[in-house]
Amino acid sequence: MAVGAMKVCVTGATGFIGAHLVAALVKAGHDVRVTYRDKSRLERLGGAKVRTAKADVLDKRSMKRALKDCEILYHSAGYVAANPAERVWQLNALSPRIAVEAAAEAGVRRVVLTSSIAAVGPTANGKPVDENQPYLASRLRLTYGDAKHEGEVEAVAAASRTGVEVVIVNPAYVLGAPVYRSMPGETSTRIVGNYLRGRLPAIVDGGASIVDVRDVARAHLRAAKRGKPGERYILGGHNVGWVELIDRLARLSGVHHPLAVIPREAAALMRRPADLGLPSGFLVDPEAYGLMAARWWASSRKAERALGYRYRPLDETLGATTDWYLELMESGAFDDYGVSRMALLAAGMRAGERFGVVRALQAAERRLGRRLVAGV
């Protein structure tokens, strides 16, 4: 091993962040072991030279075996979804405690826990949130954010009982291309893919802090080395609205699909489809409206100061994400995908553009002083 290298273990290694984390660790010369449940998914590591250990993050015994002789555990396993709720809670709220307890029994001194900006919450006053914000996002009733927050609480409590050092990192909205570029889509990148494929009819006028997956991966290594036990570090980036994001995508890619802009005030009603006479889950999961309507703007000053965290220009990140999706589209990766309600509505928006609907919306924008259409 290289000077300063360590024996480390990574859970969630075949995920979007996890695979980039493994690549960064290998590049830095560390002896990397990854856990897996399905061996076929290891191809997502892109051929990285690692050791493997079959383990379930919900089973402490198998985790303890996987952690034998390791010095640091990067617990990046998680489940980015709202349903099924039981699985969301098991992987995001329960597994961090199991990981810390297994680390303690295996003699691992430090755990770097991958949490999320969803565990911190969105801005309530337009100012970027920081690590000291009280968790108020439970008012939004977002399963994923609540579970991630609970996972932090459980991990810190287990650390206080066992003496293991736990450092938490909270990535914001992560974009970029995966290590295994043939993979047809990550949860956080689907807004880009759906736009480019003409399957996104509308966006809610919220926003997010956009960060590159490569910068997030490297920050994990810095957190392991410099992070203070019991502290959390937001890994944010560029605070932009979804409207601005779509407009940038259109400019960078040359792909122009008109999207309706749903006012944030309407999102609460959209989360209650029954009030509109629509079935639950019509078009998208109701929680998606709550996520998109909020402004997940964040400050990374603490990580910049304590960890030396830096993030690249937004257009570089969007360009990498766009280039990857365009490659997939050209290769026919989506040819077998069926037609969804979302795709039909998006086609309706494009048809409306030919009949002057978009021009009418743009004229109304000037009178109302707010965006009604994006992507043109």
Image (cartoon, rainbow, N blue to C red):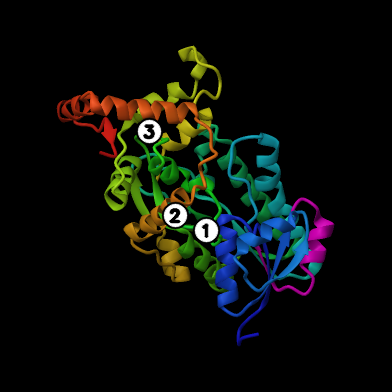
Disc number at residue 204?
3
Q: Where is residue 57 in the image (x, y as percent from the top left)?
A: 74, 54
Mark 2, secondary structure of its residue: helix
CB-based contact (under 8 Å), mark 2 and mark 3 = no
Q: Position of residue 173 (x, y in %)?
A: 46, 50
Image-based side of 81 in relation to 57, left or right: left
Amino acid type of the residue that numbered disc 2 sits on in the rendered structure: Glu
Q: Three-letter amino acid code at disc 3? A: Val
Badge 2: residue crowd in 10 Å (few <14, some 14–19, many ≥20): few
**Visible in this render: residue 230?**
no
- Residues at marks 1 and 2, CA–CA distance in whole angstroms: 9 Å
How far separated are the C-alphas under marks 3 and 1? 29 Å
Residue situated in front as seen by the camera: 13 or 119: 13
Residue behind mark 1: 181
Give the residue at x 55% y 71%: 24
Q: Where is residue 310 in the image (x, y as percent from the top left)?
A: 40, 67
Sequence-first tag of 2 and 3: 3
Task: Indicate left or right for 257 with 271 as reference.
Answer: left
Q: In which quarter of the image is the N terminus?
A: bottom right
**Relative to the observer, which residue lies in front, 206 or 124?**
206
Q: Using the image, determine if residue 232 lies above or below residue 188.
A: below
Q: Tell me if 132 is positioned left or right of 69 in this view.
A: left
Extreme residue toward the right, this view: 61
Q: Is residue 317 one of those drawn in magenta?
A: no
Q: State the extent of the magenta-drawn residues as a range.
A: 57-75
